[in-house]
Amino acid sequence: MIEARNLTKRYGDKTAVSDLSFTVKPGIVTGFLGPNGSGKSTTMRLILGLDAPNSGDVTVNGKHYADYPAPLHEVGALLEARSVHTGRSAYNHLLTLAQTHGIPRPRVDELIELVGLESVARKRAGQFSLGMGQRLGIAAALLGDPDVVILDEPVNGLDPDGIRWVRDLLKALANDGRTVFLSSHLMSEMSLTADHLIVIGRGRLIADASVDEFIRRHSKNIVRVRSPQADEIAAGVAGADVTVTPLTPGVLEIEGLVAEQIGELAAKHGYVLHELVQQQVTLEEAFMDLTQGELEFHAHSQLEEAAAA
Amino acid sequence: MTSSVGALPRLQHTGRVTQARLFLSEWTKLRSVRSTVWSLLVAVVFTIGLSALVPAVRMHHLRPGEHIDNPLELTLAGIQLAQLAIGVLGVLVISAEYSTGMIRATMTAAPKRLAVLWAKAVVYGLTVLALMVPAAFIAFFIGHAILQPHGQAVAFGAAGVVRALVGAGLYLTVIGVFGLGLGAIVRNTAGGIALFAGIMFVLPPLMNVLPTSWNNAASPYLPLQAGERVLQLQGGTLSPWEGFGILCCYTVAALAIAAVLLKRRDV
């Protein structure tokens, strides 16, 4: 369980995280979603006590991270930025971490095997590909058999095989009853891996919902219509809850009506339809819409501030 | 690489992070990076190698009837180079963790932070001490063997010689930890090395711009001049151990500033 309450973190005059509150529950995979630069990594650094918040508080299983006498047994973390000395071998990297907690050497071999780095374990980590680096980071995160696993962009640089492996691993960890919190800027990846979503933009909470609920709440009904009488149809469907967007001459996107309603309207007036498609909004688009709105909101409010000044 | 998913094997929890465990971890870090091995090798090789080369060259140019007054200084000429390698490595021991990002892994494993700084200082200091005290003694006996036939050697039993040789090892140890402290303050390799070299090697000649009386009053108290008293036989403003004590004070101050900053700053 991770609990963040009103977390705010500023770097100079830039606010990275703003009044952020959320709870990450055990037994499920929670996705932490936001565009690049939205404050995901900062939030994770705050959870791990690497950075101190300007205000607010974050605890892991009820305690501050730094108050754990053996933190690697409680929390395992993979941070987005590489956290490995490039001159040290993968094996020795894990060994230095294991030794801080008195974790025996066989555990290091066990983890190297788990992430599939046996053949390169004695090579310098600086020579690793991005994908191998991610596997090493995951091994480091799981070294202490932690109850809580925090992974920042774990699938970055992994091949499709590796991505599937991480996805299965995370689900297995959640099934063990662990708390699994992973960030990504890719909605498509989240929709396959996560059970619950926390979405942020510009350091603020945008959504906190189950994946199903998120899709339901943010999916929109858009119907694409192609017709030589597009203008007439546009005029015909016009109403308070209906938005019509002409794409190209003869093609409309109509939001607020289902395909059946538009088809019946066309039949009634004898309009010719060349195309009538109900478009399902994907999670990716819902996310883009949502975060785009957040970006625009900020751009507007800055303009307004500038105008008021 | 495999894509099969084994569940994560469970692990018997092994208890808390202790200072002793951090010593072991830092020792593993130190010995598992090539730059460490190379820097320390350079320090040992120069200390021992120059103890043969410098006295041999000096004896070759010895004028008839000349009596040199600084045989120990000739013998320990390599210490001048060793201190650069050891100070720079001291900076690197901590600054490389920042430049590579390793510091984030280190500080998540030991979030109390200060214990990591102590562990680094102790492990690095003891490593330098264990290498450089024997190196200084070996250097002495090599230099002695070259100077002796010319009647120019200082006896091992002469007043201050053993102190100077042990002192050479202690001096390099504290210089190494001083570099580590500066590296921990600056958290940047280039900046740390520049600061170390500036304080040690640029500041002393700069003192010449001061009025002579000021220069004479202040210079003996600079880290380099004060610290080197412990490996000199001739007299000076400060006694050997006073000078060494002053170097220790600079080092403790650097570590104290580093400790305060480590607690306060974000990693």
Image (spheres, grey):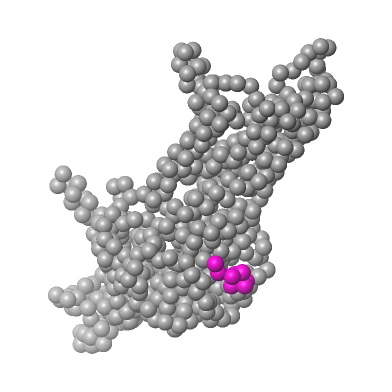
Q: Nearer the viewer, residue B127 or B196?
A: B127
Drawn side of residue B108 relative to residue B86, left or right = left
Task: Specify start and end residues of the magenta stretch as a single range.
Answer: A102-109
Q: Residue at x 47, y 71 (%)?
A: A73
Work out whether A178 lies above or below B192.
below
Work out whether A138 lies above or below B129.
below
Residue A85, image x, y percentages: 56, 55
Residue A163, image x, y percentages: 52, 73
Identify the residue at the far right of this view.
Answer: B149
Q: Nearer the viewer, residue A292 or B5?
A: B5
Is B176 within the magenta? no
Q: Residue at x 30, y 67 (%)?
A: A4
Residue A9, image x, y percentages: 30, 55
Instruction: Assign the N terminus of chain A to one quadrant of the image.
Output: bottom left
Is A106 within the magenta? yes
Q: Residue at x 25, y 83 (%)?
A: A258
Q: Residue at x 61, y 61 (%)?
A: A92
> How many numbered marks appear?
0
Considering the whole magenta stretch, tell me its main secondary structure: helix
Q: Nearer the viewer, residue B144 or B208?
A: B144
Instruction: Assign the C terminus of chain A to one quadrant of the image.
Output: top left
Residue B87 visible from this viewpoint:
no
Residue B112 visible from this viewpoint:
yes
- Quadrant in which residue A126 is drawn: bottom right
Drawn side of residue B248 relative to residue A214, left or right = right
Work out whether A238 lies above or below A300.
below
Residue A26, image x, y percentages: 37, 78
Drawn side of residue A258 relative to residue B34, left or right = left
